[in-house]
Image (cartoon, rainbow, N blue to C red):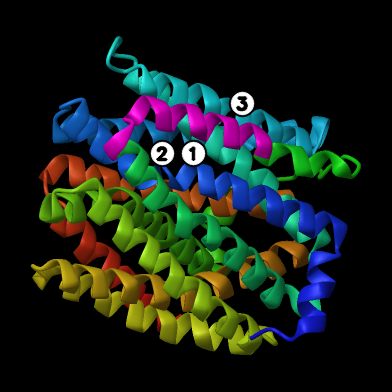
Amino acid sequence: MLRNHSIIKYLFNRELSEMYVSIALKDLSLSMIGIFVPIYLLVDLKYSFSSVMLFFLFYSISMLFSSLLAAKFTSKYGIKHGILLSMFGFIIYITLLSTLHYHNLYIISAVIGGISNTFYWVNFHADFIKFSDHKNRGREVSMWFIVAYIGLLLGPIMGSIIITYLGFTTLFIIVNLLLLLSSLPLFFSSEVYEPMKFSMKYLFEKSYLKDTFVYLMYGVRMMVGGVALPIFLFFLLNKYLSLGVIASFASLGAIIVGYLVGRLSRDENRERTMFRFGSLFHSLGWFILLFVKSFIQLAVVNIYLAISFIFVDIPHHSIFYSKAKRHKSVMGYIVYREIAADIGRIFIVLIMLLTGKLIYSFIINGIGMFFWFFL
């Protein structure tokens, strides 16, 4: 576990504590619907698989083209206002989702959702980089993940219960209220601004190629884990509650392991070692997933994927933040990373759209994670 004085130190860093509370509420709210959105479109609204993939394709394309816009907004109006704007965007996105029974504006919903997601993460990353401490960044990232996973632990099981007994409309209303609450803690301190200088050459320069590959595959991993995996699990389990239970147990495992990773994250070399070996073990889980059949097997493999990814994800963010801090433009590096990840998202959604199969996304994701070991 993290030592007590370290935990107290992080919680009494005013800006970081605001972010911890904000992201816990935000992740609690969005995790109540996040894994269920593709299922909602497929099962409740009876959209075709192609239509669902088109939804996430436009979502990803919107993220790609709004990265620069989000950074420019932050430079002029500030990080906290960027996050607040994203929350209102999420509320519009969720409201449109909840009313899709009455209209067919699912592409508009996807576009608003993608833009909102970009505005949130571009500003969150900028805020975290600004106020985190280089010597303790790995532990501070670990604390963020632990707090966030508490929300992710409760969200899926709460969401599945609400869907089962009260329906999607009630769930959407609750999520909107929590999203509004999540933005309030950020305004207990003054606004901060981050200037932006960005060049597309970052994506193609030889010195950035390894980083570009890592960020591309990170985008692939996020889309496979957030879209393909929930669909795969639901059609094997055929119950919202079972899917929510598995997701919550996976989050519990991630919380426990997050303490260990935080304690081990003492320097960048150690973080790189965890990242490399974590990606190797994580890649194996995606190949094992191809052969599971029963609820127990699905639960075990999903928990394994969540735990092994913590060894990847915490070092990944800590290293990313350190690189951004050393870069001549913090916001420019954030935008570069987001654009690379969005290209990865678009790529893997196109694979699923063109093939009509989820299995290829698991294989590509597993291969990509495997090659991270050699970086």
Rendered residue at 67%/76% (across/down): 138
Going by the image, does 177 lie left or right of 161?
A: right
Looking at the image, is mark 1 or mark 3 earlier in the sequence?
A: 1
What number is the disc on residue 60?
2
Rendered residue at 26%/50% (across/down): 241
* Disc 1: which residue: 64
Tally the marks.
3
Q: Which residues are magenta?
A: 164-181
Q: Is residue 168 magenta?
A: yes
Which quadrant holds residue 171? top left
Residue at the extreme top: 102
Going by the image, does 302 lie left or right of 156?
A: left
Q: CA distance from mark 2 to mark 1?
A: 6 Å
Going by the image, does 96 lie left or right of 106?
A: right
Whether residue 235 is visible: yes
Q: Amino acid at mark 3?
A: Phe
* Disc 3: which residue: 88
Residue at the extreme front: 165
Q: Nearer the viewer, mark 2 or mark 3?
A: 3
